Image (tube, coloured by chain):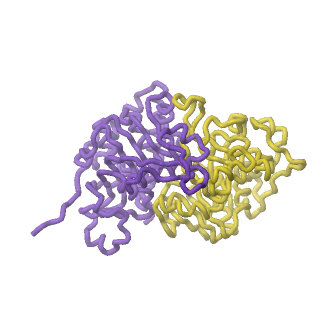
């Protein structure tokens, strides 16, 4: 095992990898290198049949020595691993059978509703413009599950109420998402540099699940702008294995994007 | 002897198909397959009052915003991934009220174009249900499901005057072949009244006929073919060349400097890459042959 301890980003990529099974169908998201690394790590270590979608490309990289591109999923360096392509329209036919999609967010509320639109309150005079909904509204409505990755864990990101909602999570909690009629399975996990969160089965409120080593419950609570569900026992993220660290650093992330 | 119509034309001739005030549909995705040769011509002419619709845009449309050409934008993403989470001019103008933004997600754009291509009044979607989109975008309406289910959102058609697309190759009649993914390019073409496709190379009709299944856009919807080698630069063209990251960083830096009140870098960028070159060859020279060739991808 490398002497440099795993960074929070690497820990999250490894967490993602551990959720992915060989028979899954997943999709890469724009500007989410941590999630993309998690997918490729699973693919290279244990899921050679993993079905990977990226912007109309259907990829298989099993046996590839090194991944050359984590930074831009819209870049054509990944195109050489495509076994099939489809139009963007046709890629939507796969949504109902996609196990995990990955989204970013500028803000998240306690039910996992996400905002990529901007910081308000006046929509005509935003304080800060976000990148836009990307595909998250329609994709989030239909896919089997989705995860959020946010680059910082602060009360500005984890808010009582999103200024705008681009991605419906568990809506207003309880069975409210189901009553909206959305066919997809909703958000499963929220990943930040401090912790992994999931959602209470009944209330659908966000719940602390795993801490990044060295982070305390109090630290997470103090940096979350709403009341997180804190279970009686909060575990620390399990240690990466030597193989996970070796493959992640040498083959998935050779340029070290996740190392700082 | 009757002869088929040839659609090959120059960037200038293609640009003449665009009128100020038109709605332009752009193909490609984020930093790949962007029709820059034709867009640069429109920039050189400083066209104005344009409405732009694209799936996921980036620094191409950002530059047009910076040149005050864009009135309204329908787009689900305006970033350059790691290079810029939100593109510079968009980030400013979408906030100060000088740019109209149709809030949409990717599915919304797809359905808008599909509704137009099919001449439907709307398509129902789950995508915006429960989001802020119907509140922010008055054209999206929550409607009853006539079959008794929960309400859905009706997505109206998008009228597109001109589609501008970039692909690997075409024949002179306008049969277009993408090598790799074709993104939503064919859909943009089907939704548009006029269609311009710029290609890296012209191939013979015989070549196209060898593999008609590789034709991604049938000539029946194409009006103009512009032959523009390296025409997506500084963005990528699948299987031909990668994005020019150095150039894109220079652009982002110049745009941000302008927004901070230092216009010189941006003015120099526009002069060097937009205003001075009068042909595709001169553009390639402005970028530098060494740089251009370094972007080539393994075939």
| In this view, B214 is above or below B34 | below
Q: How many numbered marks does the figure carry? A: 0
Q: Residue furthest right?
A: A232
Residue B196: percent from left, percent from top: 30, 52
Q: Image point 54% across, 32% down: which residue?
A: A123
Residue B5: quadrant of the picture: bottom left
Looking at the image, residue B81 sits to the left or right of residue B289; the answer is right
Please say whether residue B290 is visible from this viewpoint: no
Which quadrant, please, contains the C terminus of chain B? Answer: bottom left
Q: Residue furthest bottom?
A: B210
Looking at the image, residue B96 sits to the left or right of residue B24; the answer is right
Colour applied to chain A? yellow
Please say whether residue B256 is visible from this viewpoint: yes
Looking at the picture, tell me which residue is in the foreground, A45 or A201: A201
Q: Image point 45% across, 26% down: which residue?
A: B262
Q: Image point 68% across, 59% down: which residue?
A: A248
Residue A3: percent from left, percent from top: 77, 54
Looking at the picture, tell me which residue is in the foreground, A54 or B285: A54
Looking at the image, residue B21 sits to the left or right of residue B85; the answer is left
Residue A103: percent from left, percent from top: 62, 50
Chain colored purple: B
Which quadrant, please, contains the N terminus of chain B? Answer: bottom left
Residue B290: percent from left, percent from top: 38, 51
Residue A216: quadrant of the picture: top right
């Amino acid at each position: 095992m490398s002497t440099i301890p795993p960074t929070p980003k690497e820990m999250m990529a490894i967490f993602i990898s551990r959720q992915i099974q060989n028979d899954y169908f997943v999709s890469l998201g724009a500007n989410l290198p941590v999630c993309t690394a998690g997918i490729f790590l699973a693919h290279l270590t244990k899921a050679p049949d993993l079905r990977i979608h990226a912007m109309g490309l259907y990829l298989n990289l099993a046996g590839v020595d090194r991944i050359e591109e984590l930074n831009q999923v819209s870049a054509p360096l990944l195109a050489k691993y495509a076994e099939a392509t489809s139009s963007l329209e046709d890629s939507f036919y796969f949504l109902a059978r996609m196990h995990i999609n990955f989204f970013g967010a500028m803000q998240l509320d306690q039910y996992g509703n996400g905002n990529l639109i901007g910081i308000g309150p006046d929509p005509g005079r935003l304080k800060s413009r976000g990148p836009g909904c990307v595909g998250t509204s329609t994709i989030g409505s239909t896919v089997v599950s989705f995860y959020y990755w946010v680059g910082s864990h602060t009360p500005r990101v984890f808010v009582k109420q999103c200024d705008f909602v681009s991605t419906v999570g568990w809506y207003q909690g309880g069975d409210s998402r189901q009553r909206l009629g959305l066919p997809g399975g909703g958000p499963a996990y929220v990943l930040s540099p401090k912790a992994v969160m999931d959602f209470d089965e009944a209330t659908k409120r966000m719940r602390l699940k795993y801490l990044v080593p060295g982070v305390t419950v109090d630290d997470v609570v103090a940096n979350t702008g709403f009341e997180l569900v804190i279970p009686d026992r909060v575990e620390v993220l399990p240690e990466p294995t030597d193989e996970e660290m070796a493959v992640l650093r040498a083959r998935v992330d050779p340029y070290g994007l996740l190392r700082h | 002897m009757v002869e088929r119509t040839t659609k090959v034309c120059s960037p200038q001739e293609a640009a003449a198909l665009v009128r100020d005030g038109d709605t332009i549909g752009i193909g490609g995705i984020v930093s790949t397959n962007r029709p820059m040769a034709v867009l640069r011509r429109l920039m050189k002419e400083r066209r104005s009052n344009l409405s732009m619709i694209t799936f996921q845009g980036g620094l191409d449309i950002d530059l047009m915003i910076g040149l005050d050409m864009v009135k309204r934008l329908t787009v689900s993403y305006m970033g350059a991934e790691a290079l810029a989470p939100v593109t510079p001019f968009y980030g400013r103008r979408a906030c100060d009220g000088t740019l109209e933004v149709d809030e949409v997600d990717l599915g919304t754009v797809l359905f808008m174009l599909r509704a137009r291509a099919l001449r439907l009044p709307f398509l129902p979607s789950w995508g915006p249900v429960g989001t802020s989109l119907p509140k922010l975008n008055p054209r999206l309406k929550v409607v009853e499901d006539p079959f008794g289910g929960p309400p859905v959102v009706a997505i109206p058609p998008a009228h597109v005057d001109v589609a501008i697309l970039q692909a690997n190759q075409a024949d002179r009649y306008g049969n277009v072949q993408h090598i790799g993914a074709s993104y939503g390019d064919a859909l943009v073409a089907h939704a548009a009244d006029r269609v311009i496709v710029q290609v890296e190379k012209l191939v013979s009709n015989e070549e196209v006929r060898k593999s008609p299944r590789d034709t991604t856009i049938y000539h029946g919807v194409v009006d103009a073919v512009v032959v523009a080698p390296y025409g997506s630069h500084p963005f990528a063209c699948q299987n031909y060349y990668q994005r020019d990251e150095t150039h894109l960083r220079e652009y982002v830096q110049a745009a941000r400097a302008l927004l901070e009140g230092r216009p010189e870098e941006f003015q120099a960028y526009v002069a060097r890459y937009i205003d001075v070159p009068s042909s595709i060859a001169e553009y390639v020279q402005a970028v530098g042959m060494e740089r251009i060739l370094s972007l080539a991808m393994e075939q």
